[in-house]
Amino acid sequence: MRVNGEAPCGSSLEPSVERPERPSAPRPQEADEVLMSHINWKQAEAALDRQALVIVPTGATEAHGAHMPLDADTHQAEHVALRLAERLDALVAPAVPYGISKTFESFAGTVSLSIPLYQEVVYEIGAALIKQGFRNLLLLNGNRPNGTANDQVARRLIDDFDTEFAPVVTAVSYWEPAAARLHALRRSPVGGMGHGCELETSFQMATRPELLDMAAIEGLETPLVGWDLVAPVVPSRTYAMRPSPGSNHTSIFGDPHVASTESGVAFIEAIVDELESLMRNVSPSYWERDS
């Protein structure tokens, strides 16, 4: 151990041992050029002139087990947005850090918006961008309960502004286009990818390992969830009692124990690949299918 570059008294310097570098997900290279919050209004005007896609990441501040940070959903949506923006010459709006998180409000640190208020916030962001002249928006979601709400916001934006501004608004959760690839890459059985799970824990290992505390869940039983983010299962739209610490729930749905940095790198690459393909081949719901 060194203190201020010197060995403590009574200790000897051990020879340094070269350790192989762990893989990590590529970092977005030019964040300052794609983050709307880091550019000035003239640069924003230039993006408007070229009709750049604007990506609006939507996340949450909520419990993800004792091993993951509360901002995981927001970070993951924004990280994917930045990677995607590099490929599409897009802008990334400031992420929405609060979402529909009532499921976990019994766990300390969780901050939830009501569904109507959340939708109004996302709607106002989209409306402001559209009225400025941005015609292509992507609501990129990182928190599962936000997903259906974002879809309704996208529909409302079209209902309100299609005749005057003719926008195109896409609402998707970042894992959805890559579901088949993620399912093929996974180590957990069906039900292992839900919340604070293999997918999200691997994502954090690949991007922010310093914020993880895997020792906090060592030996902890984390049962498989009745639904799954990426497996081809019957959709689950039945709700009952929410989890709480009082019921010994871990605020985890799925299996984080099989997560790895290597999986995280592969997951993120698949996610960005499939989102890029989706956005380069946009097919609005009301348009005819290409033959």
Image (cartoon, rainbow, N blue to C red):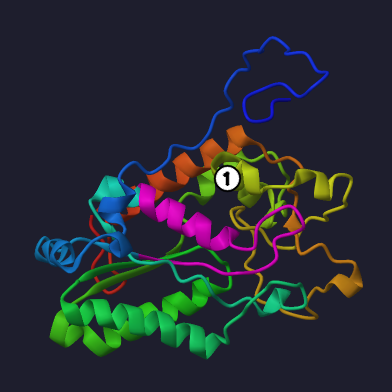
Please say if 164 is above or below 130.
Answer: below
Tell me if 164 is positioned left or right of 197 in this view.
Answer: left
Mark 1: give few (<14), some (14-19) or many (20+) Cα within 10 Å: some
Quadrant housing residue 66: bottom right
Q: Nearer the viewer, residue 134 or 209?
A: 209
User: Mark 1 sits on what residue?
Assistant: 208
Tell me if 31 is positioned left or right of 103 in this view.
Answer: left
Tell me if 277 is positioned left or right of 1 in this view.
Answer: left
The residue that appears at 80% across and 73% down in the rendered structure is: 243
**Secondary structure beneath label 1:** loop
Quadrant location of the C terminus? bottom left
Q: Amino acid at mark 1?
A: Arg
Q: Position of residue 16 (x, y in %)?
A: 66, 13
Q: Nearer the viewer, residue 252 or 291?
A: 252
Q: Position of residue 262 (x, y in %)?
A: 59, 32
The residue stretch that appears in magenta: 56-83
The residue that appears at 69% across and 9% down in the rendered structure is: 15
The residue sitting at the top extreme is 15
Please say if 7 is above or below 187.
Answer: above
